[in-house]
Image (cartoon, rainbow, N blue to C red):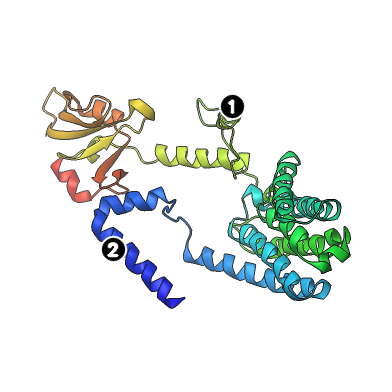
Amino acid sequence: MVRSVVAAVIMVAFLGACMGRTGFRWLLSGIGWTPDSTSYQEKLISAVGATLALLLVYWITHQALGGDTALWVTGSMGATTVLVFAMPHGMLSQPWSVVGGHLVSAAVGVACATWLPLGAWVAALAVGASIFLMMVLRCLHPPGGATAMIAVLGGPAIQQAGFGFLLYPILLDALVIVAAALLFNNLFHWRRYPLALARYQVQRTPGIAPEDFHYALRQMNAYVDIEFDDLLHLVELANEHAKSHGVSEADLVESGCYSNGLPGSNWAVRQILFILPRRPGRSGRVRYRVVAGNGLGAEGICRLSEFALWARYRVERADDGWHRIKGVDPADHGRS
């Protein structure tokens, strides 16, 4: 095991050295590795909550089932604890998804094991059917797929329990996890479980209505694990942040790069070549070059006030693209 880990680390380091910094970042992005926005405190809280809930589930399950069968069921419930404690605001983590997902999947699995000849194909059929029913009943829960497979391949103990397996231990385990999530997650003001307890006063962003979001989601035709009000709240917070961090004339500096912050093909970055300060009877002027986006390579001259209105924020170029500069160095103001 240790040798395998060491070999993997060496291989990753070797790839990084061969591909260079930019190539290595592209590789990480390609495999789905993305920056993490959660604090270590949040990570620890998630881990502690899942551990406490799973200890209780482990004990309950071993009272109903023995040996390897109990371990299988505990494994499925362990996946559920990851969702409800690490992603308590996710749609896949909500009580109906947890309880309904496990019950539907267990029922499908027991039915397949009871009415069909046992075989690997029956387990695969049970998982596929449970996914379909969970989506139809709006209780999609990934660990439910494992529960369906366990009901088919779990052995004599589950076969003897029959449909009673749904109530004990599956239903009881699911209810215990939901109850633990209710008690634990709500100890922290930034966590609310279930999500119905977290309701935001959302001010609709100009030009974007809830119906527009509904239309966009229908066009995507894919399952999005975010509650609709959370999506609107996210856009509202981003809009407020953008409004509160504009660029003033005093922020403009020579050689600085500024983005207009527009989406799609309208996006552009201008670099200030030089600034002509205000003179009596004449406003200050800026000469700039477009260094990215719409109009790449073009140059122009405009008033300081016009450039400040055009610019949303100052940016700088990195290996993986343009990044917003959060603060402005007060020393730069003297050069404007």
The mark that comes first in sequence, 1 or 2, is: 2
Q: At 76% across and 54% down in the image, what residue appears?
A: 99
The answer to whether residue 104 is left or right of residue 235 is right
Residue pictured at 51% horizontal, 66% vertical: 41
Give, as a three-letter code, the residue at label 2.
Answer: Phe
- As measured in the structure, the alpha-carbon distance from the residue carrying label 1 to the one carrying label 2 is 46 Å
Q: Identify the image quadrant of residue 215.
A: top right
Which residue is found at the position 44% from the left and 56% from the top? Answer: 36
Count every numbered label the image shows and give the total. Answer: 2
Q: Secondary structure at mark 2?
A: helix
Q: Relative to 36, is 210 above or below?
A: above
Residue 28 in the image, given as x and y percentages of width and height: 37, 53
| Residue at x 52% of width, y 65% of height | 43
Q: Which amino acid, by three-letter code, is at mark 1?
A: Tyr
* Depicted 64 relative to depicted 84: above or below: below
Task: Name the front one of labels 1 and 2.
Answer: 2
Residue 241 is tagged as none
Circle 1 packing at 10 Å, graded few (<14), some (14-19), many (20+), is few
**Residue on which disc 1 sits:** 215
Mark drawn on residue 14: 2
Q: Relative to the observer, which residue lies in front, 233 or 147?
A: 147
Residue 336 locus on image (x, y percent): 16, 39
Judge left or right: residue 54 versus residue 310.
right
Q: Is residue 259 left or right of residue 227?
A: left
In front of the other: 260 or 281: 260
Describe residue 35's horizontal placement relative to residue 81 as left or right.
left
Q: Secondary structure at mark 1?
A: helix
In the rendered image of this protein, does residue 275 appear above or below residue 144? above
From where the camera sits, is residue 179 visible? Answer: no
| Residue 205 appears in the picture as rendered | yes
Vertical order, 129 against 117 (above or below): above
